[in-house]
Image (tube, rainbow, N blue to C red):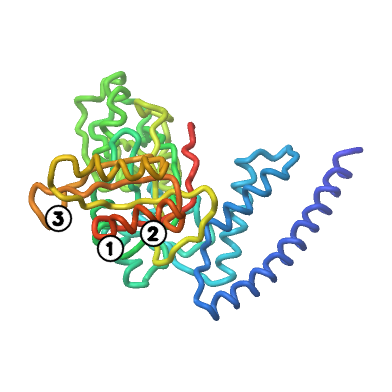
Amino acid sequence: MNLNELRKKIDSIDDEILELLNKRMEIVKKVGELKNKTGAPIYRPEREQEILNRLKKENRGPLNDSAIDAIFLEIFAVARNLERPERVAYLGPIGSFTHQAAEAKFGAMSDYLSMNSINAVFKAVETKRAKYGVVPIENSIDGVVGETLDLLGRSDLLIVAESYMPIHHTFATLEDDLSKIKKIYSKDIAFGQCRNFLIEHELEDVELIPVESTAKAAKLAAKEKGSAAICSHIAAKLYNLPILFENIEDLHTNKTRFIVISDFKNEKSGNDKTSILAKLEDKPGALVKFLEDFDKEKINLTKIESRPAADKEFSYWFYIDFDGHVDDENVQKIFKKHKKEIKWLGSYVKAISSKD
């Protein structure tokens, strides 16, 4: 079979795919009409995960699991926009890691709203300017994002999804000679994450200028000779800033966990995580006794982090993640016993933490 014949076969298959996608979207429209009547949320992470799990199980290749995720997550995003277009607020600007995380969840077609702070993202969702918000909650190197935890404690919004993204930094500049670089722009955390690179290339004495995001760093360096940016690959490309070095971070296993916040409760998926804030009495053994109840109910704790309480000096909240859904029988026992001490932050499909 020659090349033209193979191409005709591909064209024929593409025609079939298009026809099937249009059939799928016609059904999606009917689903959207029913949801609009009942006020049900359009985004159902547990349903999307159920579809992906089924497809991966039935898959016979050559597509791998990552390819199935990439293709069908975009299909889901298109479907959601057909059902009911909804805006997604994220910690900006365009080209930031949070922007990438948002697009990975909601696809390129969604209506995005760039915000300049985590608080602004929460406000956008609370005031209905956006249906969803995407913010960072922890980094594998730098730990939890305190502002996100504090806002979750004060807000009625819930965590409805999570994702993990590998964080890779590039060194981008208009210069082709490092000796010409007099200043480097980046987010303050990124400087620390790329310290070894700066030392190895004798850049530790160059002026380091912290800005609010690595995307802003790329934008500034693209306009200024003698400067450079430590930024994401996508930010450098977005501002046409040539990349001199890729993956310059000290630890290539660096990941950030992002959460999606909204105003609805997820149904059980069978592979859920629940997040809570626990405010315990300030007395010896209070935390130990609280955690013992999880052990009795055979609930696996995956994270515990203390945060200063805003309403009382030298008092702490405990942010806790554990396996299970708020509607699970053993979880309900914990919630009923500690009703006054627990603030539920959401139950959602547990994301896989990539090793990339």
Q: Is residue 11 left or right of residue 263?
A: right
Q: Which residue is mark 1?
A: 155
Q: Is there a contact, CB below 8 Å, between mark 2 and mark 1?
A: yes
- Across and down, in percent, residue 38 comes to 53, 78
Q: Earlier in the sequence, mark 3 or mark 2?
A: 2
Q: Nearer the viewer, residue 106 or 269?
A: 269
Inter-mark Cα distance, 3 to 1: 13 Å
Residue at image coords 21%, 49%: 317
Q: Is residue 53 left or right of residue 299?
A: right
- Across and down, in percent, residue 58 comes to 73, 45
Asked whether residue 105 is in view, the answer is yes
Kindly identify the amino acid type of the residue bearing the numbered disc 3.
Answer: Ala
Q: Which residue is mark 2?
A: 261
Residue at image coords 51%, 57%: 268
Q: Nearer the viewer, residue 118 or 190?
A: 118
Residue at image coords 23%, 31%: 182
Relative vertical location of residue 170 with respect to residue 314 in this rendering, above or below: above
Q: Earlier in the sequence, mark 2 or mark 1?
A: 1
Q: Quadrant of the N terminus?
A: top right
Kindly identify the amino acid type of the residue bearing the numbered disc 1.
Answer: Ser
Q: Which residue is mark 3?
A: 310
Outermost residue to the right: 1
